[in-house]
Amino acid sequence: MPEAVRLARVAENCLSGLGKAGKATRLVLSLFFKAILGIPRVFHFETLDDVGFAILTGGKKVLSRNTLGGLIRAAPVRGVLRFVRESEPKVRRMARHWISIDEHAIARFTRKFGIRKGFHTIRNKHMKIEKIFCSFDVGTRRLLSIIVTRGNLRLAPLSEKLLARFRRRARGAEIRVILDAGAADNHATLLKLANRPNQVTIVRTPRRPAYRKAWKALPKIFWIDRAEPGPYVGAPPKWIAITETRTTIAGTSVRTIVIRERARRGKDRWHALWVFGDDKTAPYQLVEEFRARQHHEQTYRVMLHDAYVDTAPSGYNKESTNPRRPGFRQNALTLYAWIAALATNALDAFTKTVPAHLLPRGLKLAHAHPRTLRRWLLNTPAEIFQTPETLIVLLRPRRLLPLWRHLAERANANPTRIPWMGDRRLIISLAESRPNAHLRAEVTFDPSLNP
Amino acid sequence: MGEPAAASTTPRLKRTREQRKARRNEVLAPWAVANRLSLDDLDPGQQWVVFAAIEFVSFCGIPALARIVGYFLGHCGLDLGTLVIAAVVGVSDRSVRQAKALTAEQMLHSVRHPVGGHRKAKLKAEHAGLVAKYLVEHPGARVKNVLDFVSTQIGPKLDRLTLRRYLKRYGLGCLRNMEIAGPAPLLSVERSTEELSS
């Protein structure tokens, strides 16, 4: 809830161009809690009549789909970009940051509009898409910033933009950038991106036959075998061989870490990394650093399947008079995707604060999927009582009672004030009576039975 | 700089009886004025014990030891009143009464494991929902009914004043008559969808 309050404040500052006060709050809160609670599409708002959801989104009724859709598209581009800047998570002061940058493609199924095409990696085809580029803090597993573009733009130039934003916030700290092979399609752009002071860049090398032949020709004595844990507990170890060589790209010799994964059957798999700006770190350590990028991919998966980022409104103008060149507006897509990212961040941050000792054996909620959180915690029946000073939520949890008691106590120790409800304090209450209360006389407190 | 250190390490010379008496009067007279007590109410024996306690409390300066001194004064058999003990220890007479009621084991435990801050409320914020629900479902409930409900269903036994403060803190009084004074966004149209879409 504090995150929602913070977003509402930022929204009122940045999106005042929407008109009457309160519209920006309602827009941002509707999108935020839509992502938190897993409402797939904006048009599902037509059938939502839950009072609790209405309160969360800042009104007495849930916004209709037409109103919400209209507000998303009406948000001014500059205001949205300012909203993104001001709501970016704070970066901790550290000597070294590990930042992953990657793209996510959103398929656009349109025959009418001639929008740009790009490669959709999940569908494995060249098609009409729009792209989201996010920077991701590998240490804290948070999405840091966003840029949305047409489908034909590539990772390396957009990484440059996102890194320029991050450098200002890193305050001179060393940045270790982790990039997928998409950044290596143009060597000149990649070198321009990588050759920065105080920056180490690790890029997955594209698998090309010429590279593979060169790696295969390396003498056997250069390879170091290593056993890694198998894919599941009790599985036989996975054997890899690792070595280091140099590759010349665009006239520059680049340190290359090559991994040959022994196949149980069929051909071996080859993986390689180009490392810029670091000739000292051990090869296997660099491989492990690169592997942390998987958290970024996982966050994209969560955004796709739990926050429904692929249902974002399109960036091209559907009212365009020239469907062959409909143009591209960043506002709706940026706002929708960024709020989904913030919701994902908020849920992940929440899972890290759940004390493990209050959970039953076998249940772990640290970095849990939003769907797991919804199933265990968020989908809990409740009653709401409004007083002039407080908003009391009386929850009726059926499971995880010790955890609920802890959460309620923590929330009530410093109650959140809800600005869109006249600064009322949010009090979380649990509908659990004292043990053995039913053994006592229940009728004594019922005034209707008074003589 | 060396002189005061030498003076502090030098053993104090034994005072005569008159000197000790003068010192006692010198300490007790301003103490009695400051705490609005009359020394005439204390017999000489009580005065000596109070003097010794004041000297010890000012010497040690540790709250836990001061509490033990208060506990000792309460049970030393000199019938010192709680006002006097409270003035010696520097706490309220109410806390002296509460400490006096403890057993020796409880006192030792409370010294070893002090509870920071004020005493925790018996009826917590987490119970506000249950009380609110009861008030909504029983609009004609009297204070006695609410107190019975709290003690039966939630646990703590409250007096009327505590319940009143609790209801006031969470603004629950309005629920009794289902009326909300002042602006209530949920009951007004100022943020409704219809208005935003217009």
Image (cartoon, coloured by chain):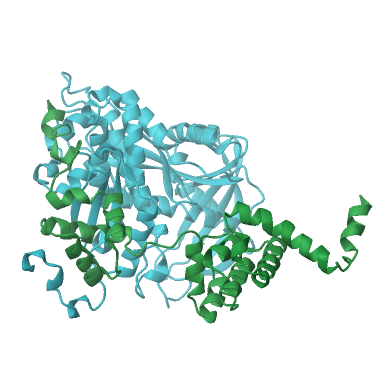
Chain colours: A cyan, B green
Q: Residue at x 87, y 65 (%)?
A: B12
Q: Residue at x 62, y 35 (%)?
A: A197
Q: Is residue A120 visible?
A: no
Q: Residue A50: where, in percent of width, then height?
A: 13, 49
Q: Is residue A236 left or right of residue A258?
A: left
Camera-side residue of A49 and A219 = A49
Vertical side of A350 occupied by A67: above or below? above
Camera-side residue of A191 and A199 = A199
User: Where is residue B46, by image quadrant?
Assistant: bottom right
Q: Residue furthest front?
A: B40
Q: Residue A397: where, in percent of width, then height?
A: 23, 65
Camera-side residue of B64 and A274 = B64
Q: Residue at x 29, y 69 (%)?
A: B157
Q: Is residue A226 left or right of residue B192?
A: right
Q: How many marks?
A: 0
Q: Residue A19: where, in percent of width, then height?
A: 23, 23
Q: Is residue A176 left or right of residue B169?
A: right
Q: Residue A205: where, in percent of width, then height?
A: 49, 47
User: Where is residue B127, by image quadrant?
Assistant: bottom left
* Quadrant (top left/top right/bottom left/bottom right) for the C terminus of chain B: top left
Q: Is residue B40 visible?
A: yes
Camera-side residue of B162 and A152 = B162
Q: Is residue A178 left or right of residue B3?
A: left
Q: Residue furthest top?
A: A321
Vertical side of B192 occupied by B102: above or below? below
Q: Residue at x 53, y 81 (%)?
A: B105
